[in-house]
Amino acid sequence: MEIRYLRDSDRIGLCNLSHQINKEHFENEPKYFCNPGKEGADWEFWKASHEKEGGFILVALLNNEIVGFVAAELTAMPNLPFLNPIKRCRIATIVVSREHQRKGIGTALYKDVCKLAKEGGAVDLNLEVFTFNSPAIAFYERLGFRNNSNRMSKSLD
C-alpha cells in the first residue's frame, strides 16, 4: 500500500469514495446532508481543502487504485483568555472503500496524519463523528480517541 498527498490525477478515485460516504450520511441524516449529486461534483471542494493553508488530503492506494483517503487541517486555537493557545489537527474525514475496510488502511492513514500533525506542531487530534456511525466510533475508540465534549442539536420545527 502507498500513502501520499492528493494529486489532480486522483479526482475520480477520491470522488468515488466521497460519494460513498456522502450517500451514507444522507441516508442516515437527511436533515443535515443533501442527496449526493453526480459523482465528481465535489472535486473543487476537496481540492480547495487540500490546498488551503494547514489543510491536506492523503490518499491510500492499492495497485494504483485509491482505496481510502483522509482530509485534515492544522489549526491554532483562537486567542481567547480562557483557552490555552495550542495547535491542533482536525480530521475532517477518513474514508475507506467498503471492499477494503478492516484491512488496516484507515489505521495507516491515521498514523500518517499523526506524523504530519506532530511535524506541524499540533499537540492533539480532534474530529466529529455522527452517532449513527457506530463502526467509525469503534474505530476511533480503538485508536485512543475519547469523548471530551458532546455536540447536541434540537430541531426547531
Image (cartoon, rainbow, N blue to C red):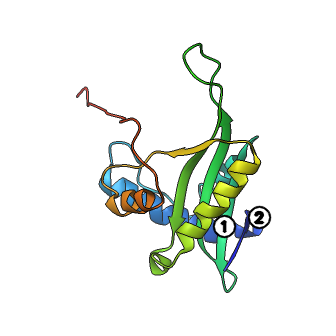
> Can residue 48 be seen in the rendering of this structure?
yes
**Residue occupying the far bottom of the picture:** 63
Query: Percent from the top left, x then y, of residue 92?
Result: 55, 49
Foreground mark, 2 or 1?
1
- Pick the front one: 131 or 64: 131
Which amino acid does the dot numbered 2 rest on?
Answer: Arg
Question: Could you tell me which quadrant the N terminus lies in?
Answer: bottom right
Q: Earlier in the sequence, mark 2 or mark 1?
A: 2
Query: Percent from the top left, x then y, of residue 131?
Result: 31, 50
Label 1: few (<14), some or many (≥20) within 10 Å?
many
Q: Is disc 2 in contact with disc 1, using a CB cutoff of under 8 Å?
A: yes
Which amino acid does the dot numbered 1 rest on?
Answer: Val
- Pick the front one: 84 or 135: 84
**Residue occupying the far left of the picture:** 157
Question: Could you tell me which quadrant the C terminus lies in?
Answer: top left
Query: Percent from the top left, x then y, of residue 88?
Result: 63, 39
> Can residue 47 be seen in the rendering of this structure?
no
Which residue is identified by label 2?
A: 7
In the rendered structure, the answer to whether residue 130 lies left or right of residue 108 reads: left
In the rendered structure, the answer to whether residue 7 lies left or right of residue 101 reads: right
Is 34 above or below relative to 19? Answer: above
In the rendered structure, the answer to whether residue 110 lies left or right of residue 27 reads: right
For the point 59% across and 57% down, which residue is it? 41
Label annotation for residue 59: 1
Q: How many marks?
A: 2
Is 36 above or below relative to 9? Answer: above
The CA span between labels 2 and 1 is 9 Å
